[in-house]
Image: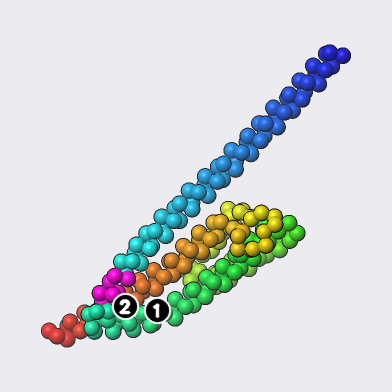
Amino acid sequence: MEARYRETLTERHRAAAKLELELEKERQRVKGYKQALISQSQQLMEERKQLQQERDTLEEEKQRLVKSGAAGAVLHQALQRENNWYQRATATLRELEHQLVERQNSFCSLIQPREQRLEMEKNILLKVVKEPIGAELDLESDLKDIFKRDKHCADLLNMDKRKNGSLMWVYLKYWQLQVTVQKHKRAEDVILGGINLPQNDKR
């Protein structure tokens, strides 16, 4: 009887040890994923910070040129031409934000089938490929990264779809900042191409 008891106890210890080993492997896997996500988020934030600095520099240059008379008129015209591009790009990002919110809601849903989410992802990718801004911002690659890595869901009682997702919100802010900086860079290119005309006329 005692031998059977010891044998049973030994088997239970082995089973418990095996489960603990599997649990530790899972913990390490999750830890590795979290570290990768944190590292990528930090990289995106650094790029965002750099873009913000570039934007501030361009804004200072814009203000300087605005005060310089003829150069200010050139800048104004350039910004007007680029404003249409900026409005289209911003509208595209707003629509993309809505689509990502719905996609993440589908990912977090306990009742929506996986096939439905995959179809949503496919349609989102097909749409951005057709948009000029998609190539300019490399949206396709970033979206695939979101679909692969963003698994954040709010608690089960959450009713606000916008509380789902984590990496997607970092990318959305990053894209919007890229668009804003590009708007000013494109205008700056026009200015640098024509800014010397009034000076040449004076000579």
Pointer 2 with pointer 1, Cβ within 8 A: yes
Residue with the mark numbered 2: 190
* Crowd band around label 2 with a 10 angstrom C-alpha radius: few (<14), some (14–19), many (20+): some
- Using the rendered view, name the quadrant where residue 79 is placed: bottom left
* Crowd band around label 1 with a 10 angstrom C-alpha radius: few (<14), some (14–19), many (20+): some
Quarter holding the C terminus is bottom left
166 w.r.t. 99: above or below: above
Q: Which amino acid does label 1 sit on?
A: Glu
Is residue 64 one of those drawn in magenta? yes
Which residue is most to the top?
2
Mark 1: secondary structure: helix
Residue with the mark numbered 1: 82
User: What residue sits 59% from the left and 69% below the top?
Assistant: 98
Instruction: Name the spot of residue 147 as percent of width and height, x first.
Output: 60, 58
Please tell me how many numbered marks the rendered image carries: 2
User: What residue sits 60% from the left and 60% below the top?
Assistant: 163
The CA distance from mark 2 to mark 1 is 10 Å
User: What residue sits 83% from the left and 13% below the top?
Assistant: 3
153 w.r.t. 91: above or below: above
Mark 2: secondary structure: helix
Q: Tell me if I can see residue 118 in this picture.
A: no
User: What residue sits 41% from the left and 70% below the top?
Assistant: 180
Depth check: 161 or 108 in front?
Answer: 161
Instruction: Name the spot of residue 183 as percent of width and height, x first.
Output: 39, 73
Our reading of the magenta stretch's main secondary structure is: helix
Q: Tell me if I can see residue 85 in this picture.
A: yes
Q: Which stretch did the figure color magenta?
A: 59-65
Instruction: Name the spot of residue 71 as percent of width and height, x first.
Output: 25, 81
